[in-house]
Structure formats: C-alpha cells, structure tokens
Amino acid sequence: MTDINKIMGDMQQGLSDPSKAVQKGNGNASFDTAIKDALKAVSEVQDNADKAIQDFSKGDVKDIHTVVVAMEKADVSMQTLLQVRNKLLTAYTQIMNMQV
C-alpha cells in the first residue's frame, strides 16, 4: 500500500511542477514564462520516461513497474498539456470573435 501512496505522490508532484515554477518567482511571473516552464517540465517527464525505457531494454532496470509508472507520468503530463492548449485556443478564438 505504501508503494501506491509513493506513486500517487510522485504523480502529483510531477503534475504540480509547472505551478511551482511560477510560484518560485517574485510574484511577477509572466504568462509566457509560466508556459515555458510547463513545457520544460513536460519535456523532462518525457525524457525520464524515454530513459526508463532505454534502461529497461538494456537490462539496467529489472522492475517493469518503474518503467510503466514513468510512461504513465509522461502520458498524464502530455494529456494535461494538450487540454491546457485546447482551453487556451478556445479562449483565444472567443476573444477574437468578440465585437468591439
């Protein structure tokens, strides 16, 4: 049961990294900085998943669960990023369609 709690804690930490990056600043973080930090965090999670897959294929990692967790973290972070992008595009479209 503690393994599940550890995995859930890791997943929550991985998903909350972009917001932590914004909070680290002096409170004047710009929107583009927040987006860049979020993209960087997702890229790091993707790289970690790729490394876990490579390590497993080389035989360095014997535990398949580690690889699966890394892949799921990458998938969840990518899906979250895509949903944020979709919301931003929808908001942009609505703003552009406003009559002034």
Image (cartoon, helix red, strand yellow):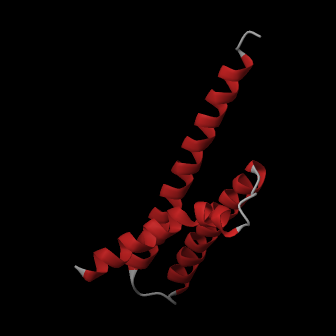
Q: Is residue 86 visible?
A: yes
Q: How many marks?
A: 0
Q: Image point 76% across, 57% down: which residue? A: 28
Percent across and percent down for residue 81 are 59, 49
Looking at the image, is 98 positioned above or below residue 84?
A: above
State which quarter of the image contains the C terminus: top right
Q: Image point 39% across, 84% down: which residue? A: 63
Percent across and percent down for residue 15 are 51, 62
Q: Residue furthest front?
A: 27
In this orientation, which residue lies closer to the viewer: 53 or 45? 45
Image quadrant of residue 37?
bottom right
In this orientation, which residue lies closer to the viewer: 50 or 46? 46
Percent across and percent down for residue 19 are 59, 60
Q: Image point 59% across, 74% down: which residue? A: 48
Percent across and percent down for residue 68 are 42, 70
Q: Residue furthest top?
A: 99
Q: Residue furthest bottom?
A: 60
Q: Image point 44% across, 66% down: which residue? A: 12
Q: Is residue 43 visible?
A: no
In this orientation, which residue lies closer to the viewer: 96 or 60? 96
- In the displayed structure image, the side of residue 40 where residue 77 appears, left or right: left
- In the displayed structure image, the side of residue 27 where residue 67 appears, left or right: left
